[in-house]
């Protein structure tokens, strides 16, 4: 690794929106917190809301604009909170509603927006609605879930041998669950379900949240004839295939509800359909989701042609709709990109890419520390979907307990937890943590990076290069995906503003991108 870059002392200016009328979430960088794994204040080995509150200053120092907190609602935790038993209360494991209100107030005091996770496709089987629905065929809530005499061929998530239908002995019918049997699907074709779930959104909007990340949003509308999956895809979970037109009317109603509140509240949908063409319609005509996750880039290998293609797909599909893209490399469902790409140098370059593409980036807590997935021995496995590795606890310092109040954490620590801890990273200006901070400082100061246009630059094999531009402000980005230095001639002059390995920052760009290096360039340096 090259010498450390210049001191990361630059203060973060307040986020300004120089292009009048731009909602905050277009220029924002969102930071995902998986609450079990972030920080533990009460010593039970599981993170909690008070733990998050105590680390808000880390996020301010880092320079993110918004936080998305994965589910902390009452839950039997079959899917670690994505099985909700009460949408309007905090699970005692994570704290209380008062803890949430305090967290939200303190985030807002620091200028941070807060999104929460809304899980509308399914409840827990322990939710009182499901208990009532299951109690008899004539229950007034029978139709709140999906009951059928015969199953179709849909597969549940996590285990391709598992049907998406489970037989209920008591009432002699099957119920639908795109995920675990403990996660029965709500029936969004039922108007009472819609009204009840709108009530959940109002509950949190009235408390002041800035928006929602919507779980499995493409699952809501279902073909009421429940046709079989075609033979070619019958082995894949239906949760990654359900794409029915009736979802769009549901989304337009949600959008109207949310836009009725002041403050540019935002809906970010998890559209887990692995084609950008299928994701794009979920923005509607500016009247459905404000933002949608687009996962194809996350599943691309670390190769220039694959990324160029993936980014061009986004431009082609989203631009005609004037839909604003999102970018995500890591989350609580996938191996971290540091682990997937196989080296720290690549993970650093990926950070430059993530934070300079056109759209709203989502960071996953711990990626700013350069964390790898934890190794999970068979006896420590807890997740039915095999996703424990990326959910390892965040090491805050180099002490034995890494800043967690208890001794035994729910999952083991990630590799190099001492050296990668937040405290150690802060002391080292060459750390991954300081790289993220410099990139976030650069973004805040550049309208081109936050909101500008994007155009590809001609570049040699193994390199992906592009320009961002707005209001006379310009930045160029060069990402070298290869493990060799490559000459990349750009009509310049340019200066190195941020280098993934910290080398040459503030100096003239000499027309070479180092091995696995990415560069953010600003005009000048002649
Ligand atoms: O994920 C939806 C989803 O489709 C993923 O589960 C995906 O199939 C898998 O993780 C790929 O590895 C959301 C949540 O993000 C996830 O944590 C939940 O388990 C799931 O919904 C059910 O609520």
Image (tube, rainbow, N blue to C red):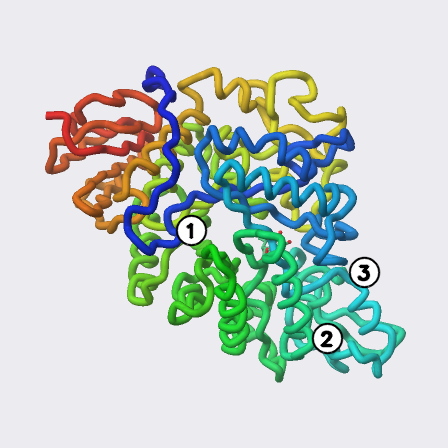
The disc, 3 or 1, on the residue closer to the chain's N-terminal end is 1
Position of the N terminus, as image quadrant, is top left
The disc, 2 or 1, on the residue closer to the chain's N-terminal end is 1
Label 2 – label 1 distance at C-alpha: 33 Å
Q: Label 3: which residue?
A: 126
Q: Label 1: which residue?
A: 25
**Rendered location of residue 315, percent (x, y):** 30, 58
Q: Is residue 143 left or right of residue 106?
A: right
Q: Which numbered disc covers residue 297?
A: none
Q: Quadrant of residue 157?
A: bottom right
Q: Identify the residue at horizontal 51%, vertical 76% (top origin).
A: 249
Q: Label 2: which residue?
A: 144
Viewer-proximal residue among 205 and 187? 205
**Rendered location of residue 114, percent (x, y):** 54, 46
Query: Would residue 429 be visible to someone looking at this image?
Result: yes
Mark 3 residue's CB less than 8 Å from ligand 1: no
Viewer-proximal residue among 31 and 244? 31
Looking at the image, in which quadrant does ligand 1 appear?
bottom right
Viewer-proximal residue among 156 and 396? 396
Label 3 – label 2 distance at C-alpha: 14 Å
**For the residue carrying disc 2, how many other residues have a C-alpha within 10 Å: few (<14), some (14-19), or many (20+)?**
many
Q: Identify the residue at horizontal 27%, vertical 42% (top origin).
A: 464
Q: Quadrant of residue 199?
A: bottom right
Position of the C terminus, as image quadrant, is top left
The disc, 3 or 2, on the residue closer to the chain's N-terminal end is 3
Viewer-proximal residue among 149 and 230? 149
Q: Is residue 450 left or right of residue 168?
A: left
Q: Secondary structure at mark 2?
A: helix
Q: Is residue 374 shown above or below 187?
A: above
């Amino acid at each position: 690794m090259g010498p450390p870059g210049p001191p990361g002392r630059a203060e973060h200016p307040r986020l300004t929106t120089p292009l009048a009328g731009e909602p905050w979430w277009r220029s924002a960088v969102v930071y995902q917190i998986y609450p079990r794994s972030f920080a533990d204040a009460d010593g039970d080995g599981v993170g909690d809301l008070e733990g998050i509150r105590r680390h808000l200053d880390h996020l301010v120092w880092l320079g993110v604009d918004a936080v998305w907190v994965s589910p902390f609602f009452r839950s039997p935790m079959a899917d670690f909170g994505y099985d909700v038993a009460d949408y309007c209360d905090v699970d005692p494991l994570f704290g209380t509603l008062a803890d949430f209100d305090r967290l939200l107030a303190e985030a807002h005091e620091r200028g941070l927006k807060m999104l929460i996770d809304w899980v509308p496709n399914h409840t827990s089987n322990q939710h009182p609605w499901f208990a009532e629905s299951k109690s008899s065929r004539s229950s007034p809530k029978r139709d709140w879930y999906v009951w059928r005499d015969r199953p179709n061929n849909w597969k549940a998530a996590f285990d391709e041998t598992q049907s998406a239908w489970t037989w209920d002995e008591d009432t002699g019918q099957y119920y639908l669950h795109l995920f675990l049997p403990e996660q029965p699907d709500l029936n969004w074709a039922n108007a009472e379900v819609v009204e009840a779930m709108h009530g959940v959104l109002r509950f949190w909007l009235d408390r002041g949240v800035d928006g929602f990340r919507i779980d499995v949003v493409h699952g809501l509308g279902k073909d009421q004839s429940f046709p079989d999956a075609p033979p070619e895809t019958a082995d894949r979970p239906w949760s990654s295939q359900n794409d029915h037109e009736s979802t769009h009317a549901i989304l337009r109603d949600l959008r109207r509800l949310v836009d009725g509140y002041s403050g540019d509240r935002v809906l970010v949908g998890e559209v887990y359909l692995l084609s950008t063409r299928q994701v794009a319609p979920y923005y509607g005509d500016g009247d459905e989701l404000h933002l949608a996750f687009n996962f194809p880039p996350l599943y691309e290998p670390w190769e220039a042609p694959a990324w160029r293609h993936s980014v061009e797909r986004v431009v082609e599909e989203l631009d005609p709709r004037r839909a604003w893209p999102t970018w995500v490399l890591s989350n609580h469902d996938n191996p971290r990109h540091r682990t997937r790409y196989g080296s720290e140098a690549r993970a650093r370059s990926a950070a430059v890419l993530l934070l300079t593409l056109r759209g709203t980036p989502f960071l996953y807590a711990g990626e700013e520390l350069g964390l790898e997935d934890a190794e999970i021995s068979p006896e420590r496995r807890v997740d039915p979907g095999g996703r424990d590795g990326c959910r390892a606890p965040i090491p805050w310092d180099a002490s034995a307990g890494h800043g967690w109040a208890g001794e035994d954490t729910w999952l083991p620590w990630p590799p190099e937890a001492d050296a990668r801890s937040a405290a150690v990273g802060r002391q080292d200006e060459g750390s991954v943590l300081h790289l993220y901070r410099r990139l976030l400082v650069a973004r805040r100061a550049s309208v081109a990076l936050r909101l500008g246009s994007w155009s590809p630059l001609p570049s040699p094999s193994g390199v992906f290069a592009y320009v961002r531009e707005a209001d006379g402000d310009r930045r160029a980005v060069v990402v070298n995906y290869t493990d060799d230095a490559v000459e990349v001639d750009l009509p310049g002059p340019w200066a190195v503003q941020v280098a993934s390995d910290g080398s040459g920052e503030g100096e003239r760009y000499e027309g070479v991108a180092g091995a696995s290096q990415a560069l953010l360039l600003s005009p000048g340096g002649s």
